[in-house]
């Protein structure tokens, strides 16, 4: 009998993300204190849970498909939110597609944009799943180096030199995963200028806009630039800011030229985002935003705690203080082998962190720590690190 490999080449060549890999390994160590996964400890706010419960009890359609682009009432609420935030009005019927979270939105977009050999510019370090998704469709991630000495800012002057005839898009995350730093307005305006000059799509993947602890005024929203509207895809997820990571819901504000292609691919992938999650997301947008300030305050306290604990280990780690999101990306002072370091730490100290090299070449010799976990977990992790590295 002929033996055939049932797995496609691109799937064989893909690796599970280092974040999940460490989380899976960590789950085998029953008492591991995990700083590996950006999974916030918060519960979905009560008004959102109540709206979903009400819909399940009273709305006979709550368990049914929606149209691929999403529930009209949610798309209208998204357009209203977009106008409130950016001052720019958009047609909800055309420009808004409800996704099953940014991961699905990104996956759909890269399918739409990338032919084998096409290039997509990503920050280095940047979000590991962008790199995997681009590669999965035969694309080439092109790294725009962030300078650690400059607080993990990229140099805008480097950007034009990265553009080739194969470049399709530039992906931006601010505040950044994994560095927690906010990109400057000058940098983001340079991204817009380069995109406009070369006809590129800018993908603003925006899970963390609601979590900024300092330099808040520095947060600049690319979606507020009217001249970029025909080149910008803005992706928002309810996972983090609304503590809805398991509901799998987000939205994309699309430029006219991509709408039909995105809806087509979104439909063949999953038909629609879960309707119940869309109902819950609508309650989130319509409800009082009280929890946003509360989440930000709690995460700000956790940031202060992790920085204070890292400061005590200043012979092991050197780091740039995060301004937003809930990650810190310390450099390892004693070794360049971040993968070995992360595995050893799990075995020897029962603390899970993510090796930095997963986030791009500049991440080598670093680890990412997510401080969205409770203060008890942070303290346990750092008590163990203190004991492990000694006085
Ligand atoms: C930059 C970035 N994009 C996307 C995601 C995934 O978001 P979602 O839960 O909406 O798929 C994450 C989650 O950590 C992220 O950090």
Image (cartoon, rainbow, N blue to C red):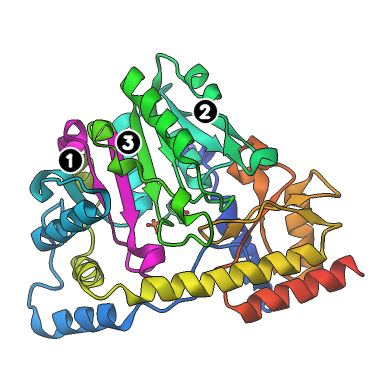
Residue 32 lies, with reference to residue 152, above or below; the image says below
Task: State which quadrant residue 380 falls in.
Answer: bottom right
The image shows residue 207 at horizontal and vertical percentages of 40, 56
> What span is colored magenta in the figure?
232-261
Residue drawn at the location 63% of the way across and 66% of the way down = 35
Return the residue nearer the eye: 12 or 378.
Answer: 378
- Residue denoted by label 3: 111
**Element at label 2:** helix
Residue 175's label in the rendered image is none
Q: Is residue 346 above or below residue 75?
A: below
239 is within the stretch colored magenta? yes
Residue placed at 65% from the left, 39% from the top? 150
Sequence-wise, the earlier of marks 3 and 1 is 3
Question: Of all residues shown, which one is farthest toward the top?
Answer: 165
Q: Residue furthest front?
A: 217
Label 3: how many Cα within 10 Å (few below 14, some 14–19, many 20+): many
Q: State the residue at coordinates (62%, 42%).
A: 152
Q: Within the magenta stretch, is there residue 22?
A: no
Q: CA distance from mark 2 to mark 3?
A: 27 Å
CA separation in Å, label 1 and label 2: 35 Å
Distance between the alpha carbons at the discs numbered 3 and 1: 11 Å
Query: For the residue with label 1, is its CB less than 8 Å from the closest atom of ligand 1?
Result: no
Give the mark toward the camera: 2 or 3. 2
Q: Which residue is mark 1?
A: 264
Q: Are marks 3 and 1 in contact (CB under 8 Å)?
A: no
SS class, disc 1: helix
């Amino acid at each position: 009998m002929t033996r055939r490999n049932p797995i496609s080449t691109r799937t064989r060549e893909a690796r599970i993300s280092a974040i999940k890999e460490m989380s899976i390994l960590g789950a085998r160590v029953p008492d591991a204190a995990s700083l590996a996964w950006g999974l916030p400890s918060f519960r979905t706010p009560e008004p959102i849970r109540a709206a979903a419960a009400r819909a399940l009890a009273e709305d006979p359609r709550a368990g049914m498909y929606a149209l691929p682009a999403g529930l009209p009432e949610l798309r209208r609420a998204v357009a209203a939110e977009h106008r409130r935030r950016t001052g720019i009005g958009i047609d909800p019927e055309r420009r808004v597609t409800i996704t099953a979270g940014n991961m699905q939105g990104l996956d759909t977009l890269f399918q739409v944009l990338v032919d084998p050999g096409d290039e997509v510019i990503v920050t280095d370090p940047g979000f590991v799943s962008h790199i995997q998704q681009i590669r999965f469709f035969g694309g080439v991630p092109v790294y725009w180096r962030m300078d650690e000495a400059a607080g993990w800012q990229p140099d805008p002057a480097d950007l034009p030199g990265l553009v080739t005839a194969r470049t399709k898009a530039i992906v931006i995350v601010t505040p950044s995963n994994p560095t927690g730093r906010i990109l400057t307005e000058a940098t983001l305006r340079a991204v817009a200028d380069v995109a406009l000059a070369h006809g590129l799509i800018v993908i603003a993947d925006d899970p963390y806009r609601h979590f900024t602890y300092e330099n808040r005024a520095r947060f600049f929203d690319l979606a507020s630039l009217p001249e970029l509207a025909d080149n910008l895809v803005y992706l928002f997820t309810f996972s983090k800011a609304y503590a809805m990571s398991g509901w799998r819901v987000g939205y994309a504000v699309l430029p006219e030229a991509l709408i039909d292609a995105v809806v087509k691919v979104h439909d063949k992938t999953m038909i629609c985002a879960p309707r119940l999650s869309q109902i819950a997301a609508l309650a989130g947008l319509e409800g009082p935003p009280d929890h946003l300030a509360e989440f930000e305050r709690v995460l700000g306290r956790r940031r202060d705690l992790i920085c204070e604990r890292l400061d005590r280990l200043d012979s092991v780690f050197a780091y740039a203080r995060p301004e937003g999101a809930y990650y810190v990306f310390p450099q390892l002072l004693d070794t360049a082998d971040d993968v070995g370091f992360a595995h050893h730490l799990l075995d020897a100290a029962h603390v899970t962190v993510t090796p930095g090299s997963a986030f791009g070449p500049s991440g080598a010799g670093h680890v990412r720590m997510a401080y969205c976990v409770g203060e008890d977990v942070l303290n346990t992790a750092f008590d163990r690190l203190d004991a492990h590295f000694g006085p």
